[in-house]
Image: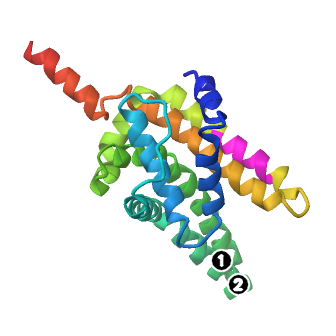
Amino acid sequence: MDIIPFIQFTLNKRYILRWVAGGIILFIPVANFLSLGYLSRSSRLLNIGSVGLPTWERKSEIWIEGIKLLFIFILYEAIPFFLFSFGFFLTALHSMTVFFGSIIKFIGYIALIVLSFFLPFAFAKFSENNEFRNALEYEKLINGIKEVMVPYVGGYLATGVILYILSKTVLRIPFIGFFVWIVLIYYTMLLATYYFTRLYTQTSLSSEKISEQSIVIEQ
């Protein structure tokens, strides 16, 4: 999937301030729901075939969408975070429970990787119609991912590598490193939103594709 045209588009001086603003807002507690909601709004725009970036109008609606996205993230990561907490508790409890605590933390890492794997399409599914329950249709999400497994895994790994590199390089820049890192993290999230949304539209998960298939069957 060619992401270069979208990158060129986002670097246009007319649109660059939109995602830079999202990156800056991401640093501000509570207000950062706007940044998450903007990603959802961008995904919805991409889902209908546009390559543009939405404006920041209707901020209250964008903010609410951001809260919903956060809840989706919490639901998906609840099990790993519970395992981490319990594992650290056992590790600190007594020398005899350190071994079991380490095992539980390891299981927590595995659970984190597995459950996070579904998040890109869960977000895309939610953003399509702004329906919270759509992001929790696990069986449909799994089937959709299977249809585009190779590019999905590639995009997932590439996103992880980019985030890791940014944390090991930009974050270490004195004084301004953290702020630049936040903005670049958000830009990476925006690029991932584009990539996975376009990938999502190629699967049976997309409402548009389902509608097209229905028309073909009727004909």
Q: Is residue 186 above or below residue 144?
A: below
**Disc 2 to disc 1, C-alpha distance:** 6 Å
Q: How is the image coloured?
A: rainbow
Residue that mark 2 sits on: 92
The residue closer to the viewer here, 67 or 8, is: 8
User: Is residue 145 visible to the viewer in this orientation of the structure?
Assistant: no
Residue found at the very far front of the displayed protein: 14
Residue 95 appearing in the image: yes
- Residue 216 position by quadrant: top left
Q: Amino acid at mark 2?
A: Ala
**Mark 2 in CB contact with mark 1 (< 8 angstroms):** yes
Q: Secondary structure at mark 1?
A: helix
Q: Is residue 160 magenta?
A: yes
Q: Residue at x 35, y 49 (%)?
A: 126
- Look at the image and say whether residue 117 sits in the magenta stretch: no
Q: Position of residue 101 (x, y in %)?
A: 64, 74
Identify the mark at residue 16; answer none if there is no mark. none
**Label 1 environment density (alpha carbons within 10 Å; few <14, some 14–19, many ≥20):** some
In the image, farthest residue toward the left: 218
Residue located at (63% from left, 67% from top): 105
Q: Is residue 65 left or right of residue 205?
A: right
Residue at horizontal 58 percent and vertical 63 percent from the top: 108
Answer left or right for 83 relative to 147.
right
Numbered tag placed on residue 88 in the rendering: 1
Can you say which quadrant of the picture contains the C terminus? top left
Question: Regarding mark 2 in the picture, which secondary structure is present there?
Answer: helix
Q: Which residues are magenta?
A: 159-167
Q: Nearer the viewer, residue 217 or 48?
A: 48
